[in-house]
Image (spheres, coloured by chain):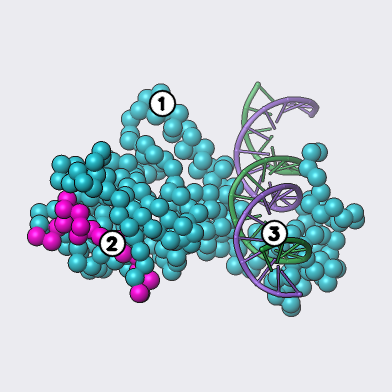
Chain colours: A cyan, B purple, C green
Amino acid sequence: MGRSPCCAKEGLNRGAWTATEDKILTDYIKINGEGKWRNLPKRAGLKRCGKSCRLRWLNYLRPDIKRGNISHDEEELIIRLHKLLGNRWSLIAGRLPGRTDNEIKNYWNTNIGKKLQDHHQQQISSPKKPMPTDFQPIRTKASKCTKAIITTPEPQRCSQQYCPDTEQVTVAVEPDHDHHYVIKGLDSFPGFNLGDDHNHNSSDYFLKDFEMDENFLSEFLYGVDFSELAANNFDTIGNRGDNNSTRSSSTTTNNTSCCERGYSYLDSDHHQDDKLQDSDFSFMDSIMGSEFGWFCD
DNA sequence: AAGGTTGGCAACCGCTGTAGG
DNA sequence: CCCTACAGCGGTTGCCAACCT
């Protein structure tokens, strides 16, 4: 039916796995461990291709697979991660213990994606609640942030020399000796020199866009326990009594788009510590937004 | 009751990145 | 540097049960 065989070899089983095949595969992996998928079928005595064995193990037979429906918390987490990561199902699954990329992908396609589509249709016919205007994840094939575009609500504050046509300023972002990403050269932008001006709050400035190369995002997210964050209430990401995590608390209240509501780097309280700390992901709630109230209704 | 339709999910395909020779 | 094998990933397909007419 249109689908060509996974492995061109004749005599290999295809389609649904039998209980016997499952047992053979499970027993083999228990003894020999995962990996070497190509040789596994022959060694285990299975008439399957290696790819098929790997998939069956990872998506179904693995002992740590969580069964049952996706919970509300998990769903919210999936939405937020998808907003951040796009269709990087394996990355999303990595933050949901016991869930597989395939499961999340299927869930998205059959539930969440449809809800979003329905909501979009509803918005077109009778707009009620605000929906993110740029409902697109940020670029995900990225690994090192090299440039950031910052917007200010007060364009006139920005020197023409640096932003001749718009309210935007592009600055360089470089890793320091501790591998923290630092926005460079802000002091040279008169409009952003906040050293003697403490009247600004963190909602005044926004990172609008990022220019990144590979791995930046992965490094960025490394070590964040999203399941824990989910369990402790999404709205408090980065603000759970952590004195160093106050940057974004005031950035989530306006109605600007999610990108424009990105991490406010120029918080006057922290201008002397312009670093993205490894453990400080307080900007996440700004990036991912609190605009999903409409979804939960 | 029978046939058609839909939705959910498991499995497959093809592409890509990476390591090793 | 090139080639090959392998593993992993995301998109797509097919099966089947539930639902509808």
Q: Nearer the viewer, mark 3 or mark 2?
A: 2
Q: Are marks 1 and 2 in contact (CB under 8 Å)?
A: no
Disc assigned to residue A184: 2
| Residue A191 shown in magenta | yes
Residue A45, visible in the rendered structure: yes
**Disc 3, disc 2: CB below 8 Å?**
no
Identified at 44% across, 43% down, the residue is A136
Circle 2: element type: strand
| Label 1: element kind | helix
Task: Give the amino acid type for the residue marked by disc 3 in the picture.
Answer: Leu
The magenta region covers: A177-196
Residue corresponding to mark 3: A55
Please state the total of marks drawn on the protein image: 3
Query: Is A9 on the left or on the right of A67, as rendered?
Result: right
Residue A158 is inside the magenta segment:
no
Please state if A75 lies on the left or on the right of A290 as rendered. right
Q: Position of residue A31 (x, y in %)?
A: 74, 78
Instruction: Point out the image quarter for the C terminus of chain A.
Output: top left
| Residue ID at (10%, 57%) | A197
Labelled disc at residue A124: 1
Amino acid, disc 2: Lys
In front of the other: A281 or A239: A281
Task: Assign the N terminus of chain A to one quadrant of the image.
Answer: top right
**Between disc 1 and disc 2, whose residue precedes?**
1
Indicate the quadrant where residue A128 lies: top left
Name the amino acid, label 1.
Ile
**Chain at numbered mark 2:** A
- Sequence-wise, the earlier of marks 3 and 1 is 3
First in sequence: mark 3 or mark 2?
Answer: 3
Task: Tell me the CA gap for discs 1 and 2.
Answer: 42 Å
Q: Nearer the viewer, residue A89 or A63?
A: A89
Q: Chain of mark 1?
A: A
